Image (spheres, rainbow, N blue to C red):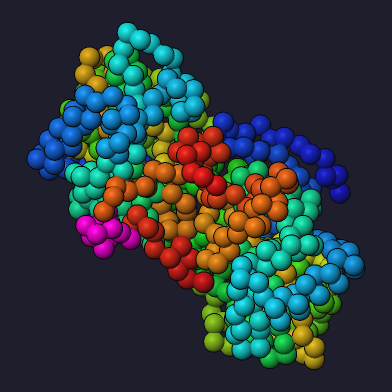
């Protein structure tokens, strides 16, 4: 297996900052292109997992104004969870995640579009997204060009805060569906009856990065509730998901971190554009 | 779009739209600009015409200051309002844009630009540049483009007067643009210049390699550039800031194009 030496591809263009750099190994790049996802083992350490779990539980009971709580059936969604701070805020910059996103999306011109905490009880129903070309969500497009230069749009990192295996609350997807040319015919049948669907076994602390264009869903936990963190990244010009604009408090708190500041920046096309600099960020 | 227009846009990456702006509206716009150019910068800015000069290093352009020639500039002309607002939902061009992007879209930039004697615009872009926000795409016979621009001529502009110039087909090029940064040479077999009469427009994919020939005349070229993109893309900074009272007088479509429809309409 090739080592993850940072290589530069001679395609960097003046308008694009930090592109052309390779952070993934050839194997990882190939895997992501073919399957539409990558698993990062042990993304969070056990103490970080515990901290995140506790933070989600506390936030669900006492949400601050900057975090919206939405209950759908047996699932609680905490929108804009990055506002919580602590490990939930720090994890958005972890090297293995950020380097992958930079290569998959648009070099250093990547931003955090949305963040969520999910608390899923037994009975949570996860609908299978369409994926591929038939997916009406244009902002999810998977794009990869010559010499393996990615320009994907919305790309998600889902972090398991519980062990999920054998259909017990597992993340599941149809491999390679990010490149499907036809709509899938599974919209009206239970997930368990979809032959092409594959479960991804994750331990607490593992993460999966996937193109939002991949057909995917989450199965119901069987006995106990499962907690997840979800971060969605996009290119610098992609607007924030409604409700996920960074608060003034978050921006102030992260002002000393160049990476966090960049990820939470108001959307922009080119950082040097004088019409962007006129905006008070 | 007619079948021929669809064919030509796919083939070439641009479409020429004659008489996109009625002549009386062209006249109103030019009269307004004449009046604003007679004012100093501060006075013009107060009226919403904040000029950004291209020889100002902060502008991002690389033009040298030459006191013997008028200075080129651009500005957000939407802040001026008035006759310029009519092009937000121009009835001659917007139907094409709708069909080229084919999903909820917004106006993400509107700019007025001058080009005086001796100046040009370097050739730039091309598909192989892989600009994330600029994609010429077709799926099942439908255009699914991102970032489509319209250049409206406010004055007659011949090739010698600095017309728009393109490399037809470069919106699909798989190789780096060897002319990136070059002055368009209208005599090169690859390059096509697009002379226009006042009121004509050229709609083009941002993926198309484009620029402008050298203006060899003493007449300043005046162009309005309007850019459209899917609703999930941000505006170009302040280039969609509107004039006072816009919301009260705007049509529903104009309002939607400026504010942008719900960016993630399908969740």
Quadrant holding the N terminus of chain B: bottom left
**Residue B211: horizontal and vertical position, in percent?**
38, 28
With respect to residue B40, does B223 lie above or below?
A: below
In front: B143, or B104? B104
**Residue at the far right in the pictured view:** A46
Q: Which residues are magenta?
A: B246-256
With respect to residue B173, does A235 lie above or below?
A: below
In front: B261, or A87? A87
**Residue A265: horizontal and vertical position, in percent?**
59, 49
Residue A153 appears in which quarter of the rendering?
bottom right
**A140 part of magenta stretch:** no
- Whether residue B202 is visible to the viewer of this picture, yes or no, is no
- Residue found 71% across the figure and 39% down from its top: A21
Q: Is residue B37 left or right of residue A71?
A: left
- Residue found 30% across the figure and 36% down from its top: B46
Residue A48 appears in which quarter of the rendering?
bottom right
Q: Is residue B201 left or right of residue B11?
A: left
In front: B227, or B68? B68
Total numbered badges shown on the rendered structure? 0
């Amino acid at each position: 297996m090739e080592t993850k030496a940072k290589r530069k591809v001679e395609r960097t263009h003046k308008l694009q900052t930090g592109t052309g750099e390779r952070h993934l190994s050839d194997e990882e790049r190939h895997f992501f292109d073919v399957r539409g996802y990558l698993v990062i083992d042990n993304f969070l350490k056990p103490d970080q997992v515990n901290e995140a779990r506790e933070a989600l539980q506390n936030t669900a009971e006492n949400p601050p104004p900057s975090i919206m709580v939405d209950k759908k059936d047996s699932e609680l969604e905490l929108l804009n969870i990055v506002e919580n701070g602590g490990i939930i805020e720090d994890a958005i910059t972890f090297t293995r995640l950020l380097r992958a996103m930079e290569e998959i999306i648009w070099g250093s011109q990547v931003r955090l579009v949305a963040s969520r905490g999910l608390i899923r009880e037994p009975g949570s129903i996860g609908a299978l997204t369409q994926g591929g070309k038939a997916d009406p969500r244009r902002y999810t497009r998977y794009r990869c060009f010559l010499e393996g230069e990615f320009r994907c749009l919305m790309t998600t990192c889902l972090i398991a805060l519980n062990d999920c295996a054998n259909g017990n609350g597992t993340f599941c997807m149809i491999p390679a569906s990010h490149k499907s040319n036809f709509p899938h015919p599974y919209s009206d049948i239970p997930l368990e009856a979809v032959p092409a669907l594959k479960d991804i076994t994750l331990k607490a602390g593992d993460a999966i990065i996937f193109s939002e264009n991949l057909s995917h869903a989450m199965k119901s936990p069987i006995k106990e509730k499962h907690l997840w963190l979800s971060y969605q990244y996009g290119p610098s010009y992609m607007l924030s998901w409604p409700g996920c604009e960074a608060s003034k408090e978050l921006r102030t708190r992260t002002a000393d971190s160049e990476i966090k500041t960049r990820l939470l920046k108001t959307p922009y096309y080119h950082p040097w554009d004088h019409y962007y600099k006129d905006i008070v960020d | 779009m007619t079948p021929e227009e669809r064919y030509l846009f796919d083939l070439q990456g641009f479409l020429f739209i004659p008489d996109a702006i009625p002549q009386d509206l062209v006249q109103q716009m030019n009269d307004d600009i004449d009046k604003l150019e007679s004012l100093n910068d501060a006075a013009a800015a107060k009226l919403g015409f904040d000029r950004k000069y291209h020889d100002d290093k902060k502008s991002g352009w690389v033009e040298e200051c030459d006191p013997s020639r008028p200075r080129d500039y651009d500005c957000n002309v939407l802040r001026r309002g008035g006759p310029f607002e009519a092009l937000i939902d121009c009835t001659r061009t917007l139907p094409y844009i709708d069909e080229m992007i084919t999903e909820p879209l917004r106006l993400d930039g509107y700019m007025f630009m001058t080009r005086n004697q001796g100046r040009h615009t370097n050739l730039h872009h091309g598909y192989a540049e892989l600009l994330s926000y600029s994609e010429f795409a077709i799926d099942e016979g439908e255009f699914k483009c991102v970032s489509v621009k319209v250049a409206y001529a406010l004055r007659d502009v011949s090739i010698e007067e600095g017309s728009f110039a393109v490399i037809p087909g470069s919106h699909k090029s798989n190789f780096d643009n060897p002319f990136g940064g070059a002055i368009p040479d209208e005599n090169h077999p690859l390059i096509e210049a697009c002379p226009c009469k006042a009121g004509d427009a050229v709609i083009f994919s941002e993926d198309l390699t484009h620029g402008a020939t050298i203006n060899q005349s003493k007449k300043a070229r005046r162009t309005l550039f309007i850019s459209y993109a899917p609703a999930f893309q941000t505006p170009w900074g302040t280039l969609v800031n509107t004039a006072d009272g816009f919301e009260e007088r705007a049509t529903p479509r104009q309002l939607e194009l400026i504010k942008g429809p719900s960016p993630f309409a399908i969740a």
